[in-house]
Image (cartoon, rainbow, N blue to C red):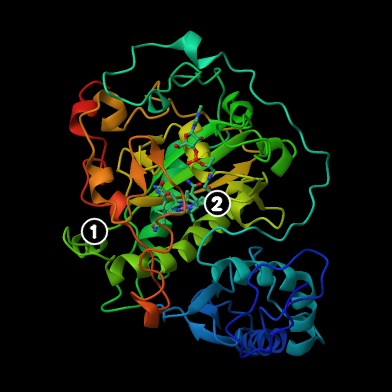
Amino acid sequence: MLPQGDHNSLFINEIPKWGEPYPNILNRQSVLECLTDYLLQVNYRGYRPDPRKVLAVRQSDRTATLRNASAPIRQEVYYFIEGEIFPKEGTTRMKVGQSPSELAEELLVQHYERLYIWVAYDFTKGSPPGFRKPFDNPLIIKGSSCPNPEQVNRRQAPEGVNPRFFLPDPLAANIGDGGISPDVALDEIASFVTDLVKRDFRNALPEGDNPPIWDEPLIGIASATDPLFERFQDPEVVGPCHRFPEEWLPGARSVISVFLPFTGHISENYSRSQRYSAVEFSSGKWNGSKFLNVVRRALVRFAESHGASAVAPNIDPRYDSDGWLPFWSERHAALAAGLGTFGLHQNFISEKGAFGRLCSVVTTLNLKPTERRYTEVYGYCLYAFDGSCRACINRCPTGAITDAGKIPGRCETHGNKEHLKDWNYGSCGHCSTWIPCSRGIPAKIRKTL
Ligand code: B12
């Protein structure tokens, strides 16, 4: 059961279960008042929708206020009224004889559920179990039909490397484009996301002079029918709880994966010697996670504007996990989408390194898959490449990484409790900073690509 916490409680369950009464995660009355006010303003003597206006929701009591987009403030989230809450042009135009409060109520009936889902996810620090809304269709469990990795071995396991980290990708590096003519070119998607990253005011730290959190992104595409998604269901990969693109979205044809690297400002403030993470990083991680959701939602709208549909599994009401095994893994999806490989630290290493985060959407758009330039699951990891690197092992302050792998969870609380407690941030980023794969593919490996 959900705790029926009062509005002022900070201990509100962020992620409700489906079908239970609306939890107190978004104050409905305040949203209604904001919308009424907005409708009054933009319908005054003619209709002039205002692209600057945002609904600002604060974390403490989940009430909304109407504001102009400006620098983000700590513990708030923002949604553009035009284009984001109401993607369809003209939705906020009042009909003859209609009062602003009538239209506001009408719109809220249609959009409140979606809004409270957004708020729940945007105020959650990680990617927790989700709403547990059941999938409509019976789950598909296929498991691997990929060739046995041992049969596709392309080179011998390097000397001194734990064989666990010498894993050939069971598929050929390039799955080919199948001669498809895509609905949208990759460049168009890339400039859409890059533009968002560059221009959206939410890509900024609330602290200091509000420097940006994320740098230019990398975008990759996987085919929704790539056999790797079957392989992900194998117990040693993710497990049968990992859902197929088709289950998230019937008719799915492609998966768009985005890697967002942290900006230089964030990495420069993370010195090599500090025991705990810098406030810039912790804030960037927490506030940057909200921005990942901005990107996810924008990509869904992008697909819809091209006459297709899309779902962002990580903020979908059906998203859940079996312990730490997610119904959709951002890193595994990124590997399928040609963006990079795993590292010994279990972070994902992209062409822009491991110091960043990932998001993805599943879409019915027919897109050209990105070529995978690697043939091994740990292809961009210098340890797995030739055993010459132990940087992340040495850097982890909790001893969570050894050459037998990473003990997930050992690092999880490092710095979360005492360090940066007043900021309500916390978290550790040692295993993705000051190592050869932090900001790119290690040079020795790059030469071989
Ligand atoms: C659960 C979770 C955690 C848990 C457990 C982590 C874990 N390893 O499972 C905890 C709370 C500890 C955690 C911590 C952190 N997390 Co976390 N976490 C997740 C979450 C929700 C799911 C992770 C997952 O898929 N686990 C499943 C298991 C199976 O994954 P795995 O063991 O690593 O998988 C291995 C096997 O598949 C194996 N393998 C064996 N055979 C084969 C064969 C094939 C073909 C393949 C492909 C693989 C394979 O290779 C993999 C790597 O070793 C994702 C979000 C999401 N939905 O994807 C974020 C996510 C992974 N976390 C992320 C981050 C950044 C972190 C932190 C660094 C946070 C921080 N402090 O900044 C820390 C430390 C991460 C670490 N190095 O362990 C990012 C990773 C970004 C990146 N560059 O990699 C993600 C993707 C969130 C995001 N949206 O960006 N996390």
The location of residue 89, given as percent across then percent down, is 64, 65
Tag 2's secondary structure?
helix
Residue 212 can be seen, yes or no: no
Q: Nearer the viewer, mark 1 or mark 2?
A: 1
- The quarter of the displayed image where residue 242 is located: top right
Comes first in the chain, label 1 or label 2:
1
Q: Residues within 10 Å of mark 1 (few under 14, many from 20)?
A: many
Of residue 101 and residue 61, the one placed in the foreground of this image is 61
Disc 2 marks which residue?
Answer: 299
Residue drawn at x 63%, y 87% is 34
Q: Please, is residue 206 above or below residue 34 in the view?
A: above
Specify the label residue 160 is tagged with: none
Say which quadrant the N terminus sits in.
bottom right
- The quarter of the displayed image where residue 282 is located: bottom left
Of residue 13 and residue 210, the one placed in the foreground of this image is 13
The location of residue 235, given as percent across then percent down, is 61, 32
User: In the image, is 243 to the left or to the right of 280?
Assistant: right
Residue drawn at x 78%, y 80% is 95
- The quarter of the displayed image where residue 195 is located: bottom left
User: In the image, is 290 to the left or to the right of 183?
Assistant: left
Say which quadrant the C terminus sits in.
top left
Residue 46 can be seen, yes or no: yes
| Type of amino acid at the residue the image marks with label 1 | Ser
Q: How many marks?
A: 2
The location of residue 107, given as percent across then percent down, is 75, 75
Residue drawn at x 67%, y 53% is 320
The location of residue 172, given as percent across then percent down, is 47, 16
Gap between marks 1 and 2 measured at Cα: 27 Å
| Type of amino acid at the residue the image marks with label 2 | Leu
Specify the label residue 267 is tagged with: 1
Are dots 1 and 2 in contact, CB under 8 Å? no
